[in-house]
Every structure is written in C-alpha cells, then in structure tokens.
Amino acid sequence: MSIWDRLGDFITRISSSTSSGVADVVEAVRTVFSGDADLRRRVAFSVAMIALSAKMAKADGIVTQDEVRAFQEIFEVPREQRRNVARLYDLAKRDIAGFETYAERMAQLCGSGHSNCAMLEDILDGLFHIAKADGLVHEREGQFLHRIAEIFRIEEAHYQSILARHVDLGAADPYVVLGIERGKPFEEVRKRYRKLVSDNHPDRLIARGLPQEFIKIATTRIAAINAAYEMIERGLRHA
C-alpha cells in the first residue's frame, strides 16, 4: 500500500470519527501510525504541509492557480486520492483554531524539539515554494511565514538564510544564503558550503521522512546554495 493510500485511509478515518480539529488530527497521526516510526514521519510531514498550506491560504485570502500548481509540485497526489487530500486541506482551512495553534501542534508532531530543526525547515521551505509561486511573497504571506518560523524555533539568522534562498539572488546577499558572516576566510566559506550540500543530499531528506516529490524542491534549495557560493568565489577571485 502506497503512502497516499495510507494517508487516504487516515483522512477518511479522522473525517468520520472525530471533530477534525488540529488536536484530533495530531493525536490520530500518533495513534494510527504508532507501530511504524518511518511511516509516521512521512505522514506527519505530509499532514503538516497540507494543513499549514491551507492556513496560509486562509491568512492570505487568495489561492491562485500558480499556488495550486506549486503545491502539486511538492505532492504528486494520485488522482484517486486527490479528493482525500482536498478534504484534509478543507478541514484545516475551516477549523476555527488559528494557524499559530496548528504550527505549534505540527512542530510537536514533526519537530525534534531543538532549534533549527531540519524537518521543520523543510516544511517552511515548502510553504515558501507555494507562497512565491505567483511571482512574489505577499506581505501577509511574509508575516505568516515569519511567525511560523518563530513557532518552529528557527533562529532569526537562519530564517534570513531560508528567506534569501527564495528571493532573486541578484537582490540577496550570498553570505546570508550560506548563513556565514561576510569577511570570513574563504576556507570557512567553502567548509560551510560543503556542509550545506551534504545536509541537503536527497538521501538525507528522504531519511527525514520527506516524500519523493519534495526532492524537486530540494534541488531548488541546492541551486540557490550553489549560486551563492559561486558568487562569493567570483567576488573573491576578482577582489
């Protein structure tokens, strides 16, 4: 049975047997998948992305076709399961609980409990990918994403690095993208760059519980990291 079949069964169960608030959803993920930690991580990531995408759409007030396509780039949902995914999206969107409550519960479900948790960064990255799909991150989306980062315990400097990956690199500081202070020796820059590339290797992302489709987003992340490093290297060479 595929991850989407399991997720579809799960959504059907919570839709029919609970009031479908965020607490019910989180508890159901823990209970239904208690015997399979790897599957629980994958389902938890998918549930968090779907639910927080819905909350971001509600906060912004508009869902564009570009954003729908961006969501589909992260999740290539089989046709027979699209209705179930839409049900979870609508449940989250209708839930009277605010997005901060959702973010807090999703952080407990998916996070490590430490600051700058890699899986929570992955969720934030996916939300950025959807938010910028229509060409820019709107003010309300920016406020939403920044608050999500705070709840996820993503430190401000780290958040700025994530943000810089999602703007036009021509307007971004490549040192911010790499998360390293300007003026550091090039050897330290290279060391930081290599660590980022290693940390974002597809095998590591899959091991964290990300669906295969998310690797497409990870390649965009790596591209921004590579571009920043090359910009710094060119600048130092011509200095």
Image (spheres, rainbow, N blue to C red):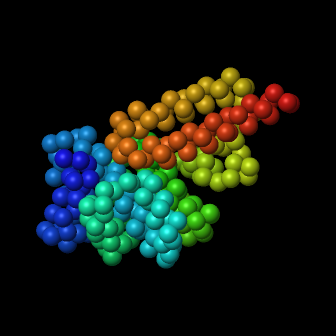
Q: Quadrant of residue 20?
A: bottom left
Is 146 left, or right, of 37 in this rendering? right
Image coordinates for residue 225, horizontal then vertical, percent? 61, 39
- 32 and 220: which is toward the camera: 220
Position in image of residue 189 (x %, y %): 67, 29
Quadrant including the C terminus = top right
| Residue under the image location 85 percent in, 30 percent down | 238
Q: x, y percentage for residue 165?
A: 61, 48
Left or right: where 118 falls relative to 33? right
Q: Residue at x 41, y 68 (%)?
A: 55
Which residue is depicted at the point 27% across and 60% down?
81
Q: Find the residue positioned furthest to the front.
A: 79
Residue furthest out toward the right = 239
Percent position (x, y) of residue 4? 26, 53
Q: Is residue 41 above or below residue 78?
A: above
Q: Above or below — where is 97 with respect to 204? A: below
Residue 99 location, quadrant: bottom left
Q: Residue at x 26, y 65 (%)?
A: 84
Question: Compared to 70, does 120 lie above or below?
Answer: above
Residue at the extreme top: 187
Q: How many marks?
A: 0
Residue 195 visible, this angle: yes
Camera sees residue 92? no
Q: Is residue 157 left or right of residue 33?
A: right
In the image, 66 versus 79, the foreground residue is 79
